[in-house]
Amino acid sequence: MTNDQGSDARATQAEIDAADWGTSSLSHGAGCVEVGTLPGGWVLVRNSNDPTTVLKFTRAEWHAFIGAPGRGGVLNDEFDRFGLFGGVKKE
């Protein structure tokens, strides 16, 4: 798998070790999505239950996913139909 810059979208072990990792305050330490950053704007994403499988995104790819209120992406509730809300559209 490659990203829009043509590089491998999987992070190397050196990148995983060097990343500054964070989780949501709602995670409570079990089975959560962790997000890490690297110099140069790279964003890494992994599941805390499998910390060795890590995807790597460019800053542009990450911002396209996160989006902005009123303009799409996570911040515009485009992914609420997955997971927590179990396919039920949030009112």
Image (spheres, rainbow, N blue to C red):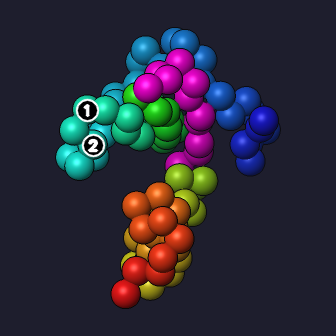
Q: Could you tell me residue 34's position as x and y percent?
A: 39, 36
Whether tag 1 and tag 2 are in contact, CB under 8 A, the answer is yes
Q: Identify the residue at horizontal 74%, vertical 48% (top origin).
A: 4
Q: Which secondary structure class fits the magenta region best?
A: strand
SS of the residue under disc 2:
loop
Identity of the amino acid at label 1?
A: Gly
Closer-to-camera residue (84/21): 84
Pointer 1: what residue?
A: 29
Residue 55 lies in the magenta-colored region: yes
Crowding around mark 1 (Cα neighbors within 10 Å: few <14, some 14 to 19, many 20+) is: few
Q: Identify the residue at horizontal 57%, vertical 63% (top origin).
A: 64
Total numbered labels placed on residues in the image: 2
Identity of the amino acid at label 2?
A: Ser
Residue 74 lies in the magenta-colored region: no
Pointer 2: what residue?
A: 27
SS of the residue under disc 1:
loop
91 relative to 42 in the view: left or right: left
26 relative to 56 in the view: left or right: left
Q: Identify the residue at horizontal 31%, vertical 32% (top origin).
A: 30
Segment tinted magenta in the rendering: 49-59
Q: Is residue 84 above or below residue 55?
A: below
Closer-to-camera residue (91/13): 91
5 relative to 37 in the view: left or right: right
Crowding around mark 2 (Cα neighbors within 10 Å: few <14, some 14 to 19, many 20+) is: few
Q: Is residue 36 visible?
A: no
